[in-house]
Image (cartoon, helix red, strand yellow):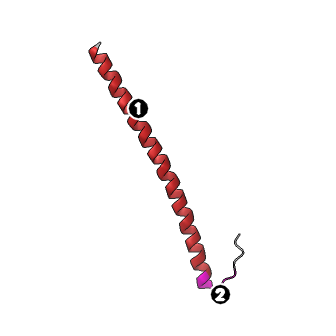
Amino acid sequence: MFNCYFKSSKEKKSFYQHKKLEMLNYIKDSLERKIASVTASIEVLESQISRDQEVEVTN
């Protein structure tokens, strides 16, 4: 996977921990974008429902 030469097992462990942290942060960012998208869709849908209910009341 990675062609790295480590001086010690501690160095190797640290390297893989940092790679894992990068991966988890990437996943977190991706999930946050998806949550923001879903939240925006919910807000638009709620405003449409509210608008449609106002139209029904006035008719």
Q: Which residue is mark 1?
A: 45
For the point 46% across and 47% down, which residue is it?
Answer: 35
Q: Secondary structure at mark 1?
A: helix
Q: Write down the quadrant of residue 14 in the picture.
A: bottom right
Sooner in the amino-acid sequence: mark 2 or mark 1: 2
Q: Position of residue 49 (x, y in %)?
A: 36, 27
Q: Write down the quadrant of residue 50 in the picture.
A: top left
User: Is 44 drawn above or below residue 6 in the view shown?
Assistant: above
Q: What is the quadrant of the N terminus in the image? A: bottom right
The amino acid beneath tag 2 is: Lys
Q: Position of residue 24 (x, y in %)?
A: 53, 62
> Which segment did they paint magenta?
5-11
Which numbered tag is attached to residue 7? Answer: 2
Residue 46 counted in the magenta span = no
* Total number of numbered discs in the rendering: 2
On screen, residue 20 versus residue 58, left or right, reads right
Residue 9 counted in the magenta span = yes
Q: Secondary structure at mark 2?
A: loop
On screen, residue 56 versus residue 45, left or right, reads left
User: Is 29 drawn above or below residue 42 in the view shown?
Assistant: below
For the point 53% across and 68% down, which residue is it?
Answer: 21
Q: Write down the quadrant of residue 41 in the picture.
A: top left
On screen, residue 6 versus residue 31, left or right, reads right
For the point 47% across and 43% down, which residue is it?
Answer: 37
Q: Position of residue 46 (x, y in %)?
A: 37, 32
| 3D distance between C-alphas at marks 2 and 1 | 57 Å
